[in-house]
Image: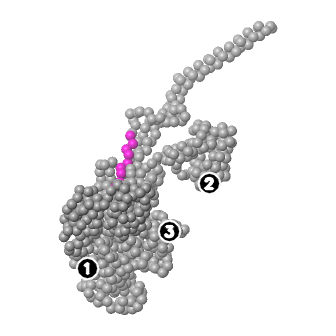
């Protein structure tokens, strides 16, 4: 066979194979299109098109004046597809990438990150989360310049998943009250309690998968638009919150305490203006782990003696002036001994003094005498004062108080005397605060409020008005006596160390032993609860510090000073709390204000505002004063270019302006007005001349 025939045969065979392949392609295409068409069309639809959830933007949380407490910001979660980078790219950049990751996140060493990346590459993992820490957009841009990652999404394997993260501009301030919500819709605080309003409603949209694995939204009539969450406006005052938290933390550090809480409430409205719950981490730092104010039950200790006095004054012939014998500070009730905290006791004193000095013996004796045969009547007062049921506050997780009742298991002869001074039952600190706030509020007990309104932008969707729990906790006669008692505690009693100088505080100290496995220990819960100013109450507050260590372990020395520090700060900031000064008391006849020299226009305005008669004898801008009877005349002052001005008696601002305008270099000492100047007025000013002035 010659070469020509051989080539022709090969061409025919090749052509035959091409024809057969073409026939096979046509047959297969027809089979796919007509026989399996529906199957593959459906699969293509699933792969290229899909309905995806469009997450709603979570609402914001604001303070009482509109300051942002919590909002949602876009962050990124970083993962890695270890199968995408080429071998040479991965090998060359591995060491450097591990170094960058370790340095940036700080949660693993370079070696650990290198091992993680190598293992992912070896096992062909397409999704490995590199860190639980979320990054912002600027950090994302920085990471995209790192080795391997800079090759891009499809060749570098870096996966940046956009997510909304809650951001708090004030960091941990009131953190437990603001709270959080996790991906399972579990959480705490306002974030959890108002999750339905804040969370909004997720939507659904039709998406198409395009090149690069990116999903593009496609219009579809069945799309459901996401409805963004509503905003909360709380009652919290960020400035007062900072003051309260700082004061509490300082006291806890000073006394090496385990836990502490503060809550400040507006008397008339029940608005919670500040709330802080701190726990020690054992290393000298404090953080919010639990909302003790609303969610923890404590034995109230001596702060409960207010309830005892309400029952006694309302339902017995007891008067504040009656005498009670506390003996040496010990008394036995049914084989149990009740003790006072003061050595040797108070002896025989009035009921008022016994309360002011927080005598356990006095309260136990009085209650045993007047309610011993009718203990249920005393417990009825606890119920009437709303201390035996949850208050129903806006933060979820409020527990039910534990109150023993006559006839129930655990009730004995000692139960009533113990209850008289705050032992044998448990309530939340918010119950105690609400009760004392009622005394400050003319007897009206109101529910504490944390959220004022739910809003969409500037439109109010829902508001929360002050809710009255008890219109009148006691008679006006009893109320007057209670206010006298609480003021007396601070003026003459256990809290006299916080007695104010510019305003009066009313309140009660409390010290309760901690119950541990059924036995009382030598560890204490110290507290102070009260209101201020006592003459016209505007704020009430409670401070509780658990297990202080050292010499000071009573409410008067641990908790009360924190209350005073917070109250002082509020008083200093709120001018409405200040009583006007008695002008007549301080006014002196025929005394003119200190006016020596200065700008004529400013001095004239000042005198006119003060009602001082003044007349001008010159049109000059800068003048000196001359007293004429009960008024002043303005006379020309020595001022001019290149002339040393007369600045005696001027304010520092005016003096330095005139001296420097004359070309003088000024040196000075002291504060106030000019009382000496080194250069005589009217002298010539030469280049570089210096002048010294003394202020006083």
Q: Nearer the viewer, residue 54 or 561?
A: 561
Based on the picture, tell me whether residue 234 belongs to the magenta stretch.
yes
x and y percentages locating residue 80 in the rendered image: 59, 44
Q: Quadrant of residue 354?
A: bottom left
* Residue under numbered circle 2: 108
Relative side of 361 to 607, left or right: right
Give the spatial CA distance, label 1 vs label 2.
Answer: 65 Å
Neighbourhood count class around disc 1 (C-alpha, 10 Å): few under 14, some 14–19, many 20 upward: some
Q: Nearer the viewer, residue 667 or 70?
A: 667
Disc number for residue 481: 1
* Residue under numbered circle 3: 280
Q: Quadrant of residue 576?
A: bottom left
Q: Tag 3 or tag 1, which sits nearer the N-term?
A: 3
Relative vertical location of residue 352 with respect to residue 453 in this rendering, above or below: below
Q: Main secondary structure of the magenta part?
A: loop
Neighbourhood count class around disc 2 (C-alpha, 10 Å): few under 14, some 14–19, many 20 upward: some
Relative side of 158 to 253, left or right: right
Q: Which residues are magenta?
A: 225-236
Dot 1: element: helix
Give the spatial CA distance, label 3 vs label 2.
Answer: 27 Å
Residue occupying the point 66% across, 41% down: 90
Dot 3: element: strand
Q: Tag 2 or tag 3, which sits nearer the N-term?
A: 2
Based on the picture, tell me whether residue 115 belongs to the magenta stretch.
no
Relative vertical location of residue 366 with respect to residue 674 in this rendering, above or below: below
């Amino acid at each position: 066979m010659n070469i020509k025939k051989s080539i022709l045969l090969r061409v025919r065979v090749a052509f035959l194979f091409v024809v057969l392949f073409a026939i096979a392609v046509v047959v297969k295409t027809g089979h796919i299109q007509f026989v399996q068409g529906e199957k593959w069309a459906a699969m293509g639809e699933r792969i290229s098109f899909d309905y995806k959830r469009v997450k709603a933007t979570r609402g914001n949380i604001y303070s009482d004046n509109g300051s942002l407490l919590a909002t949602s910001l876009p962050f990124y979660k970083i993962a890695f597809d270890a199968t995408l980078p080429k071998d040479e790219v991965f090998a060359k950049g591995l060491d450097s990438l591990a170094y960058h990751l370790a340095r940036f996140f700080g949660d693993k060493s370079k070696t650990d990150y290198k091992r993680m990346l190598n293992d992912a590459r070896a096992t062909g993992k397409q999704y490995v989360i590199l860190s639980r820490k979320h990054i912002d957009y600027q950090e994302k841009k920085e990471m995209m310049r790192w080795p391997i990652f800079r090759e891009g999404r499809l060749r570098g394997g870096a996966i940046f998943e956009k997510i909304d993260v809650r951001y708090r501009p004030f960091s941990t301030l009131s953190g437990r009250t603001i709270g959080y919500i996790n991906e399972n819709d579990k959480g705490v605080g306002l974030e959890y309690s108002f999750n339905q309003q804040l969370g909004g409603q997720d939507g659904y949209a039709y998406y198409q998968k395009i090149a690069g694995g990116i999903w593009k939204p496609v219009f579809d009539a069945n799309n459901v638009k996401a409805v963004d969450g509503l905003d909360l406006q709380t009652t919290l005052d960020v400035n007062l919150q900072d003051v309260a938290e700082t004061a509490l933390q300082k006291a806890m550090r000073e006394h090496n305490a385990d836990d502490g809480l503060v809550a400040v409430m507006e008397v008339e409205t029940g608005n919670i203006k500040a709330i802080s719950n701190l726990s020690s981490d054992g290393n000298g730092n404090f953080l919010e782990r639990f909302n003790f104010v609303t969610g923890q039950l404590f034995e109230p200790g001596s702060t409960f003696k207010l309830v005892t006095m309400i029952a006694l004054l309302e339902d017995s012939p007891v008067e504040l002036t009656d005498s009670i014998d506390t003996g040496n500070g010990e008394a036995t009730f049914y084989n149990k001994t009740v003790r006072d905290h003061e050595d040797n006791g108070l002896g025989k004193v009035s009921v008022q003094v016994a309360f002011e000095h927080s005598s356990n013996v006095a309260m136990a004796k009085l209650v045993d005498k007047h309610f011993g045969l009718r203990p249920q009547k005393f417990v009825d007062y606890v119920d009437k004062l709303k201390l035996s049921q949850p208050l129903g506050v806006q933060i979820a997780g409020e527990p039910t108080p534990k109150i023993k009742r006559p006839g129930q298991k655990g009730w004995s002869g000692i139960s009533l005397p113990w209850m008289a001074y705050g032992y044998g039952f448990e309530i939340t600190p918010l119950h105690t605060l609400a009760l004392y706030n009622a005394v400050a509020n003319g007897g009206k007990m109101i529910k504490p409020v944390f959220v004022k309104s739910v809003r969409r932008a500037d439109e109010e969707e829902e508001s929360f008005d002050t809710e009255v729990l008890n219109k009148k906790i006691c008679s006006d006669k009893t109320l007057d006596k209670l206010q006298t008692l609480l003021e007396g505690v601070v003026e003459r009693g256990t809290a006299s160390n916080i007695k104010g100088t510019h305003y009066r505080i009313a309140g009660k100290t409390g010290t309760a032993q901690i119950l541990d496995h059924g036995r009382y220990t030598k560890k204490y819960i110290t507290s102070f609860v009260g209101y201020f100013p006592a003459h016209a109450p505007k704020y009430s507050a409670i401070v509780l510090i658990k297990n202080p260590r050292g010499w000071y372990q009573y409410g008067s020395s641990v908790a009360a000073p924190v209350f005073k520090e917070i109250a002082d700060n509020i008083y200093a900031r709120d001018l409405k709390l200040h009583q006007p000064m008695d002008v007549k008391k301080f006014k002196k006849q025929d005394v003119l204000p200190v006016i020596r020299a200065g700008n004529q226009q400013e001095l004239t305005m000042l005198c006119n505002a003060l009602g001082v008669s003044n007349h001008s004898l010159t049109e000059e801008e800068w003048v000196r004063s001359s007293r004429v009877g009960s008024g002043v005349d303005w006379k020309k002052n020595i001022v001019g270019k290149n002339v040393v001005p007369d600045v005696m008696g001027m304010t520092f601002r005016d003096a330095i302006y005139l001296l420097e305008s004359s070309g003088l270099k000024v040196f000075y000492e002291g504060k106030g007005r000019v009382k000496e100047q080194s250069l005589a007025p009217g002298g010539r000013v030469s280049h570089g001349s210096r002048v010294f002035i003394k202020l006083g």
